Image: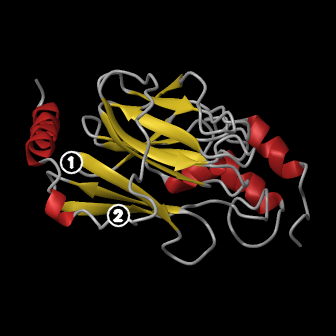
Amino acid sequence: MSVSKSFARLVLGVATIVGVNSAFLPELNADCPILFGDDVLYDAGSGPWSAAIGDLDGDGDLDLAVVNFGDDNVSILLNNGDGTFAADVLYGAGDGPVSVAIGDLDGDGDADLAVANLDGDDVSVLMNDGNGIFAADVPYGVGVLPFSVAIGDLDGDGAADLVVANVNSGNVSVLLNQCRGACEGDANGDGLVDPLDSGFVLARFGCDVGAGDPDCDTADMNGDGLVDPLDVGYILARFGECS
């Protein structure tokens, strides 16, 4: 068993032993003596470890994302609109996912996923197509034993960034979003869509998207996981758009 899986099981064991101390429960409203009804169970994958809530399919209802530690994937359960959920749909993540966060990572108005992978020492990003269907995960390297991930605009540029807590390396990884924002096609970030952007992409043809080079990731203009002639075409179709 890997060190990280042993650590995860230790945490689970401690959580089980500690339980809930009734002394810390809030007083119940006299008009509402029961806060919650009985639980309703929905299937997920093997070893579901963490869950997040958000509108994943854009219908105004809150859906569920659950990371499955044992299966290295994410269960998506879409809300039927009445608090009941459809059967889970599975999407691959990294090795040993333990935390999931929901946020708009590419600025298109849809809720995307970020997943911390304990055994992979990375965070997976899964982009939403707007209907609650997710593209294949793209990994970004972080510290050792990443245990928790959160999403927020850390540098005030309007794009959602990532922060990951790394248990074994005793630090926090901050990944600033290189999202192009409203100026689609402006690969080099100078506020124009022009031949310089085509050159930016051409210089990075064939680079390894998702391997930790933000310029390479930016050069993947159409988000298909490759830097190739299609990205140059993406820019050419938008020449002058931001001028």
Query: Residue at coordinates 63% horizontally, 49% vertically from top-left?
Result: 111
Q: Is residue 225 left or right of residue 183?
A: left
Question: Which residue has dot 1 on it?
Answer: 144
Residue 95 image point, x, y percent? 32, 30
Residue 205 image point, x, y percent? 63, 40
Query: Residue at coordinates 89% horizontally, 55% vertically from top-left?
Result: 238
Question: Which residue has dot 2 on it?
Answer: 28
Q: Nearer the viewer, residue 81 or 170?
A: 81
Query: Residue at coordinates 44% horizontally, 22% vertically from top-left?
Result: 43
Q: Quadrant of residue 182?
A: bottom right
Residue 62 image point, x, y percent? 61, 46
In which quadrant will I find the N terminus?
Answer: top left
In which quadrant will I find the C terminus?
Answer: bottom right
Asked if 26 appears above or below 119 in the picture, the reply is: below
Q: What element carries label 1?
A: loop
Q: In this view, does 172 lie to the left or right of 64?
A: left
* Structural crowding at the residue carrying mark 1, measured as other residues with C-alpha within 10 Å and reported as few (<14), some (14–19) or many (≥20): many
